[in-house]
Image: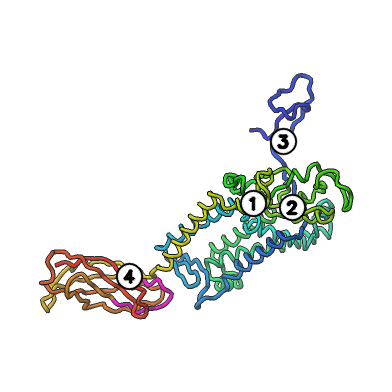
C-alpha cells in the first residue's frame, strides 16, 4: 500500500470523495512523523510517589545481586546447575510449577489493580516508565529543562551542543551498560561477573545479553520513550477491556472546567474553572490532552493532576479539576464521597477471592514443601535371591536428591512386610544440593511373603531434621 494518497484540498475530511476535474489536489502522508515531546518537570504528591518507587525498585534491582546470603548470592538463576536460589529457598527443575503459580499471581494482580485504579503499573513501576524517568533526569542534568532542551535542538551544532549532547549520551550508555550488567548478574554471580569485567573476559552469552539489554534500555527509554507506550506495548491496547464505569482513572471534570477561560487569582469567575493554560499537556510524557477524555496513550502517571492542582492553587480554585475519579462519578451517577463504596463491587470481590485463594494455596504448599526427592531403581540383574540366612533378599538403587541448602545424614527405612529390614545402605551422608545413588539391600523372612510381588514403601528421613522425610513405593519380589 502506498504511503501517500491524493485528496482534494476542500474534501480532506471525506476520503471517499474523488477529486473532480479542476479541483486542486495535494498529497498527504498516511503516516504521522514522530514529534519529539519536551515535557516539563512537575512537583506534587503523585510525582513524589513516582520518584519513591523509582528509588525503591532500583535499589532492590541493583542491590540484590550483591547481597550475600549464607555464603552465596541471595537471588541467583543458575541455569548451568539448573537451580534457582531465592534467599533460604532453592528451586529445582522439578519445582517448575512455582513459576506457573508466580505468573498466575502476577496476571491476577494486574487484573485486580487495573480494575480498581487503571494503569497503576504503567504509571509508577513499569521498567519503561522507571528507566525513562532516570534517563530524562540525566538529560535535564546535561541539557536543562524542557525549554532549554528545545532551544538546544533548534540551534546549530557548536561546541556547547556537542559537549551537552555527547555528555548526555555517554551517561546514558554507562547507565544502560550497568543495567545490562545487573540483569546478567542474576544469572552469573555478580562477584564473578565483576572479575570478568575487570579482566574483559566475558563469555559470549554474557556479552550478548549485557549489550542486548543495554541497547534496549538506551533505545526504548532514551530514544523511543512514548513511542513504546503508544505503539509497542500491547497493554495499552487491551487495557480498556479491564475498565468499567467504576474504575478509578485520571479524569478531567468537564462540567466544572468548561467553558474554559483565562483569569488570574482574585478575578471574578464568569465561566469554568479551567484557565486553558495547557500545563496538563506540557507535563504529559506522552503528549496527550487529558481534557479530551480517556485515551489509550495515557499511562496513568498523574503528572497532569499535580500540575493542575498547582494552577488551581494559584487562581484560588479548589483542587481536583483533574483527579482520580470514576466515569460514573464524573457523570453525576453518584458523588465523589461514594467512590470508595463502589470500589468493592462484585467484579473486584471475585478478583480478590481468586487472588487470595491462590496466594493461600501457594503459601501453604510452599510451607509444606519437602526439599527431598527419592527415586527407586530396581537392580534388574538380581531382582531376588536367597541370603545365607535363608531369608529372601532384594537389591535396590535409591537416587536421593538433597534439595536443601544444608548437608544431612539420611536414614533409609522400609515397611510393608512383617520383619522387613534394611541390611545395607541404611545411612548415607549427602551434601547440600547434592545427589547420591545408594545401593540398598532388603531382607524378609520367606514365611512373611505370601505373593510373588508384595508392595512395600521406602522412607528416607534426615536424622537431624525429622521433618525432611520422603516416602516412595516399590515392590518386593519373592
Ranked by sequence position, the earlier of labels 1 and 3 is 3
In this rendering, position of residue 249 left or right of residue 344: right
Q: Residue at x 52, y 55 (%)?
A: 352
| Residue denoted by label 3 | 29
Q: Earlier in the sequence, mark 2 or mark 3?
A: 3
Rendered image: mark on residue 320: 2
Query: Real-space Cα distance between discs 1 and 4?
Result: 52 Å
For this view, does 454 lie left or right of residue 166?
left
In contact (CB < 8 Å): disc 1 and disc 3:
no
Task: Measure the alpha-carbon separation of dots 1 and 2.
Answer: 14 Å
Residue 403 inside the magenta-drawn segment: yes
Residue shown at 28%/70% (left/top)? Answer: 398
Q: In this picture, which residue range is highlighted in magenta?
A: 401-411
Gap between marks 1 and 3 measured at Cα = 45 Å
Say which element carries label 4.
Answer: strand
Give the number of the disc on residue 470: 4
Q: Position of residue 379 (x, y in %)?
A: 22, 68
Instruction: Please tell me how crowded label 4 is: few (under 14), some (14-19), or many (20+) other residues with Cα within 10 Å.
Output: some
Q: Sequence-wise, which precedes: disc 1 or disc 4?
A: 1
Q: Position of residue 461 (x, y in %)?
A: 32, 75
Q: Secondary structure at mark 2?
A: loop
Answer with mark 4 or mark 2, whichever residue precedes in sequence.
2
* Residue displayed at 71% across by 49% down: 286
Residue 370 sits in which quadrant? bottom left
Query: Foreground residue, 356 or 366?
Result: 356
Q: Nearer the viewer, mark 3 or mark 4?
A: 4
**Disc 1 designates what residue?**
339
Residue 165 coordinates in the image, percent (x, y): 77, 59
- Would you say residue 224 is visible in this rendering? no
Work out whether residue 207 or residue 82 is closer to the camera in this orientation and state it.
82
Quarter of the figure with residue 327: top right
Amino acid at each position: 500500500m502506498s504511503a501517500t494518497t491524493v485528496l482534494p484540498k476542500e474534501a480532506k475530511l471525506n476520503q471517499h470523495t474523488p477529486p473532480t476535474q479542476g479541483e486542486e489536489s495535494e498529497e498527504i502522508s498516511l503516516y504521522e512523523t514522530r514529534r519529539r515531546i519536551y515535557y516539563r518537570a512537575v512537583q506534587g504528591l503523585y510525582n513524589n510517589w513516582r520518584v519513591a518507587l523509582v528509588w525503591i525498585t532500583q535499589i532492590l534491582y541493583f542491590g540484590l545481586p550483591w547481597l550475600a546470603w549464607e555464603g552465596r548470592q541471595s537471588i541467583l538463576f543458575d541455569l548451568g546447575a539448573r537451580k534457582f536460589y531465592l534467599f533460604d529457598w532453592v528451586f529445582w527443575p522439578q519445582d517448575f510449577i512455582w513459576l506457573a503459580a508466580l505468573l498466575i499471581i502476577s496476571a491476577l494482580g494486574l487484573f485486580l489493580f487495573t480494575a480498581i485504579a487503571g494503569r497503576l503499573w504503567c504509571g509508577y513501576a513499569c521498567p519503561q516508565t522507571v528507566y525513562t524517568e532516570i534517563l530524562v533526569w540525566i538529560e535535564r542534568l546535561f541539557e536543562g529543562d524542557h525549554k532549554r532542551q528545545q532551544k538546544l535542538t533548534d540551534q546549530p551544532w557548536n561546541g556547547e551542543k556537542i559537549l551537552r549532547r555527547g555528555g548526555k549520551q555517554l551517561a546514558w550508555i554507562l547507565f544502560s551498560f550497568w543495567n545490562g550488567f545487573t540483569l546478567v548478574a542474576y544469572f552469573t554471580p555478580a562477584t564473578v561477573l565483576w572479575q570478568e569485567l575487570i579482566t574483559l573476559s566475558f563469555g559470549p552469552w554474557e556479552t550478548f545479553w549485557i549489550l542486548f539489554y543495554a541497547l534496549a534500555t538506551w533505545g526504548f527509554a532514551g530514544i523511543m520513550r512514548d513511542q513504546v507506550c503508544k505503539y509497542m506495548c500491547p497493554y495499552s491496547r487491551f487495557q480498556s477491556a479491564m475498565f468499567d464505569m467504576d474504575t478509578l482513572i485520571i479524569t478531567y471534570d468537564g462540567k466544572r472546567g468548561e467553558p474554559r477561560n483565562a483569569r488570574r487569582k482574585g478575578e471574578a469567575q464568569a465561566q469554568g474553572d479551567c484557565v486553558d493554560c495547557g500545563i496538563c499537556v506540557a507535563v504529559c510524557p506522552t503528549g496527550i490532552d487529558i481534557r479530551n477524555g480517556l485515551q489509550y496513550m495515557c499511562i496513568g502517571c498523574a503528572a497532569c493532576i499535580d500540575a493542575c492542582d498547582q494552577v488551581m492553587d494559584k487562581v484560588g480554585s479548589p483542587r481536583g479539576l483533574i483527579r482520580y475519579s470514576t466515569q460514573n462519578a464524573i457523570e453525576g451517577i453518584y458523588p465523589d464521597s461514594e467512590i470508595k463504596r463502589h470500589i468493592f463491587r462484585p467484579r473486584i470481590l471475585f478478583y480478590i477471592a481468586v487472588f487470595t485463594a491462590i496466594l493461600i494455596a501457594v503459601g501453604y504448599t510452599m510451607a509444606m514443601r519437602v526439599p527431598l526427592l527419592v527415586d527407586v531403581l530396581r537392580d534388574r540383574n538380581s531382582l531376588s535371591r536367597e541370603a545365607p540366612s535363608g531369608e529372601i533378599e532384594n537389591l535396590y538403587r535409591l537416587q536421593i536428591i538433597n534439595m536443601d541448602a544444608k548437608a544431612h545424614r539420611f536414614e533409609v527405612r522400609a515397611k510393608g512386610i512383617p520383619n522387613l529390614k534394611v541390611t545395607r545402605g541404611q545411612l548415607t551422608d549427602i551434601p547440600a544440593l547434592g545427589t547420591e545413588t545408594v545401593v540398598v539391600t532388603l531382607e524378609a523372612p520367606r514365611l512373611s511373603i505370601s505373593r510373588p510381588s508384595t508392595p512395600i514403601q521406602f522412607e528416607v528421613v534426615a536424622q537431624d531434621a525429622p521433618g525432611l522425610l520422603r516416602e516412595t513405593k516399590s515392590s518386593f519380589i519373592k
